Amino acid sequence: MTPMSNDYPGKLLEVHEPPCLSLYQPTHRHRPQNQQDPIRFRNLVKALEESLHQKYPKREVKPLLEPFHVLAGDALFWNHTLDGLAVLGGPDMFQVFRLQRPVPELAVVADSFHIKPLVRILQSAERYQVLALNRREINLFEGNRDVLDEIDLAPGVPRTITEALGEELTEPHQTVASYRLGAGATPSRHGHGGRADEIDTDTERFFRVVDRAILEHHSQPSGLPLMLAALAEYHAPFRKLSHNSFLMDTGLEINPDALSLDDLRQEAWQKMEPRYLARLAELVESYQAAQVREMGSDDLAQIALAALAGRVAILLVEADRTVPGRIDPATGEIGEADLSHPEVDDILDDLAEMVLKTRGEVIIVPAERMPTATGAAATYRY
């Protein structure tokens, strides 16, 4: 799984050369369900093609769709899908996102990208990362309450102590040739250990390199809380030298490679849930205090005007809620609903995009935790 950085809204919401092609579909992790996924993808690409031909000549349509066709024929990709897929393409970009939650099928050609499903998923307050660590290697995971997946480490992030220290290793270390989570896993190892003090020195240096690399390449770009999963003996040394402000105070004192991926998720969510609920409670309390001072509102029309002016600092949006309608991007006025395209014309998602464009924060909140009945709650900057 390739993680998304927390600056993705700015990159996708900026002006791109049209046409902007947005494709979404639910996918499946296992056979035989995933065998239908590339077929459904090709059908959605066909819908994009038909839409493009209404406005653009054939010679311009072909290069736009070429990367979509290449992806459709990538058997390896379709054998490693998650729960949803987002593909955004155009003359100046082509980006594929494997998602940890299903999304409705959608194929849209417009002057800007349709990123509402991404906002719904990636602005949730329940996301977190887990750093599985021992003195020889690391693995990084990202998930939510329902799912946890391993992340492809960014270039520059070492997986093993050998990659991190190279020729600076004091002694040859035992390294893992194959590492997979799961009870009963039997990774093969090779090499031999050095003297105890030398190993301790190398372990500390390895932890320093890992901490710096994870902070730079994963924690800062994602903005997600980081949970340490390691044997108890490694927690204090790692925390003592860590400069990662995203590292959670509580972690998992376990051997992570002795657990299945789902067991690791369950253990992680037990630690994460109290933090998640406290975060939501803090956001709700902050909104309610702002509303008393007339620095917040749940009125959609007022929020739209405030968002257009860049006044919204934090916007809480009710998960899985749709309010059909259209916001005039020039005036901020809310128009009548276009019920034939409810997935496109959703006031709540439009508000979220407007707030993101002005560097505000958008948080998707479960219905039972929302402090309002309108589906939105905005706290103003001024």
Image (cartoon, helix red, strand yellow):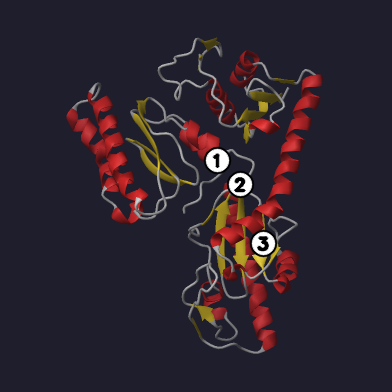
Quadrant of the rendered image containing residue 66: top left
Q: Disc number at residue 228?
A: 3
Residue farthest toward the front in the current orientation of the protein? 32
Badge 1 crowding class, 10 Å Cα cut-off, few under 14, some 14 to 19, many 20 or more, is many
Q: Is residue 245 visible?
A: no
Number of numbered markers: 3
Instruction: Pick the quarter of the image with the C terminus.
Output: top right
Classify mark 2: residues with Cα within 10 Å, few (<14), some (14-19) or many (20+): many
Determine contact: label 3, label 2, CB under 8 Å.
Answer: no
Labelled disc at residue 122: 1
Q: Residue at x 53, y 35 (%)?
A: 119
For disc 2, the marked residue is 127
**Side of 305 where 175 appears, left or right:** left
Q: Residue at x 31, y 40 (%)?
A: 41
The answer to whether residue 367 is left or right of residue 191 is right
Whether residue 268 is visible to the viewer of this picture, yes or no, is yes
Give how far across and how far down residue 118 sits, in percent. 50, 37
User: Which residue sits at x=40%, y=17%?
Assistant: 340
The answer for how far apart the CA atoms under marks 1 and 3 are is 22 Å
Q: Earlier in the sequence, mark 1 or mark 2?
A: 1
> In what element is the residue under mark 2?
loop
* Kind of residue at disc 2: Arg
Name the spot of residue 114 as percent of width and height, x first. Answer: 43, 30
Of 136 and 146, nearer the camera is 146
Q: Which element carries disc 1, helix, strand or loop?
A: helix
Circle 3: residue type? Leu
Q: Nearer the viewer, residue 233 or 11?
A: 233
Earlier residue among tags 1 and 3: 1
Taking the image as shown, residue 274 lies to the left or right of residue 184, namely right
Residue 215 is drawn in which quadrant? bottom right
Cβ atoms at labels 1 and 2 below 8 Å apart: yes
Residue 77 or 20: which is nearer the viewer?
A: 77
